[in-house]
């Protein structure tokens, strides 16, 4: 898979995951949306099975299927997924490996 295609797929999964997180927080998340998100995110496994977005999505899905009848737990899972997406959207600082700056 080309780097551009992988980047585009990652962006699509981020948007889908964000939508799922917001629906979970609002209490209107259908099970099919979670299944669709997992299917879409599993395409990331082709390139990197340890991708942070994939890990966040799978953690959310596992929690959702275990606690989907508890509105409070689904809300918390939605918050965690949204926070994971926020962390992934933060840019990496330039010169991150420089010991004279970062120790």
Image: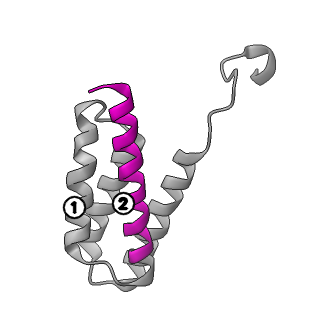
Residue nearest the observer in this picture, 16 or 87: 16
Specify start and end residues of the magenta stretch as a single range: 1-23
SS assignment at label 2: helix
Where residue 50 sits, quadrant-wise, is: top left
Q: Is residue 19 magenta?
A: yes
The image shows residue 85 at horizontal and vertical percentages of 49, 54
Disc on the earlier residue, 2 or 1: 2
Residue at point 23% right, 42% down?
A: 43
Placement of the C terminus among the 4 image quadrants: top right
How would you rate the neighbour count of disc 1 (Cα within 10 Å): few for under 14, some for 14-19, many for 20 or more?
A: some
Q: CA separation, marks 2 and 1? A: 9 Å
SS assignment at label 1: helix
Residue nearest the observer in this picture, 4 or 66: 4
Q: How many marks?
A: 2
How would you rate the neighbour count of disc 2 (Cα within 10 Å): few for under 14, some for 14-19, many for 20 or more?
A: some
Residue at point 39% right, 76% down?
A: 23
Residue that mark 2 sits on? 16
The image shows residue 18 at horizontal and vertical percentages of 44, 62
Placement of the N terminus among the 4 image quadrants: top left
Residue at point 23% right, 46% down?
A: 42
Which numbered circle lies on residue 5? none
Whether residue 98 sits left or right of residue 57 in the image: it is right
The image shows residue 81 at horizontal and vertical percentages of 44, 61
Whether residue 81 sits left or right of residue 60 in the image: it is right
Which numbered circle lies on residue 36? 1
Is residue 41 positioned above or below 98 on the image?
A: below
Whether residues under marks 2 and 1 lie with C-beta atoms below 8 angstroms apart, the answer is yes
């Amino acid at each position: 898979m080309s780097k551009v295609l992988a980047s585009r797929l990652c962006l699509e999964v981020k948007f889908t995951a964000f939508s799922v997180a917001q629906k979970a927080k609002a209490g209107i998340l259908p099970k099919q949306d979670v299944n669709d998100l997992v299917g879409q995110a599993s395409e990331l496994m082709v390139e990197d099975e340890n991708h942070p977005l994939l890990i966040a999505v799978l953690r959310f899905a596992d929690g959702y299927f275990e606690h989907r009848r508890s509105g409070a737990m689904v809300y918390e899972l939605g918050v965690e997924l949204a926070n994971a997406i926020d962390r992934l959207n933060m840019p990496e600082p330039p010169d991150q490996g420089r010991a004279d700056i970062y120790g």
